[in-house]
Image (tube, rainbow, N blue to C red):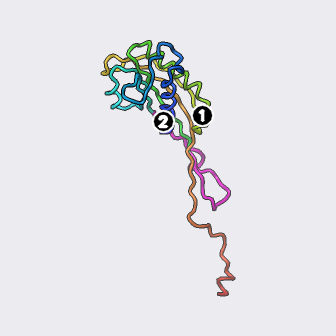
Amino acid sequence: MLATGVLLGLLREHFGNPQAITEPLLKHYVWRSDDDTAIMIETCTNDVLTRLQMRPAILVRRDVIQIKREGLDDEIKSFSPSTGNSYVVTLHGSHTIFCIAGKPNHAEMLANETAIYLLQFAPCIRGNLCFRGDFKLEQIGELATIQGVGGQYVVPVTFSYVTDFAWTIAPDVPVLRHINFKLLLNS
């Protein structure tokens, strides 16, 4: 969810500023936070598709996240039993950003603008989202038509990433280190 929110925020910021849009034909695709916006920038849901009408759009969808096991039972060995056991798994995921427009060349330009902007911003995304040095453009897909939406064209742009999920299970009480039998026998 964090990655989806960051992508939405970055794209809204970029397309919310006409001076930031590099492609001259897209300068009028300015995002606003109300329903009269010139371009929709949302998560990819069925509700969004019904509200799309003939507006251009950028729809962000999280793809499958694959979990890669680390070590034996995901455990990271620690040397202090009082701090508990630490565990980690590596998550490999991706997001697809669907760039939609009423004209095929506009969909292509929207995909290129989106891909180039996020590609240039990738070092900041990696640093701020704790991705393990990996947030990269995987592909800019081929142009297609969207069925049932009335002649809109779409170009998918896919970014992949790798991150870790770590946790610790700590004991509720201090670990019993030894029993003093002399103290027990004298009392």
Within-10-Å neighbours for mark 1: few <14, some 14–19, many 20+: some
Residue at 67 percent across and 80 percent down: it is: 181
Q: Amino acid at mark 2?
A: Gly
Q: Does the segment drawn in magenta span residue 27?
A: no
In the picture, residue 146 is in which quadrant? Answer: top left
Q: Which mark is residue 165?
A: none
Residue 165 lies left or right of residue 35; in this view the side is right
Q: Which range of residues does the magenta coloring cover?
A: 62-88
Q: How packed is label 2: few (under 14 Cα within 10 Å), some, or many (20 or more)? A: few
The answer to whether 36 is drawn above or below residue 165 in the figure is above
Picture quadrant where residue 81 is located: bottom right
Does residue 44 lie above or below 104 as drawn?
below
Position in image of residue 19 (x %, y %): 53, 20
106 lies left or right of 186: left
Mark 1, secondary structure of its residue:
helix
Where is residue 38? Give x, y as percent.
40, 22
Question: Whole-percent x and y of residue 121?
Answer: 58, 27
Front residue of this view, candidates 114 and 69: 114
Q: Which residue is mark 1?
A: 126
Which amino acid type is shown beneath numbered disc 1? Arg
Does the CB distance between marks 1 and 2 fall below 8 Å?
Answer: no
| Point 59% across, 24% down: residue | 120
Query: 121 or 133, which lies in front?
Result: 121
For mark 2, give the secondary structure.
Answer: helix
Residue closest to the eye, 33 or 57? 33
Q: From this viewpoint, which residue is outermost toward the bottom?
A: 187
- Residue 5, which numbered label? 2
Which label's residue is closer to the chain start, 1 or 2? Answer: 2
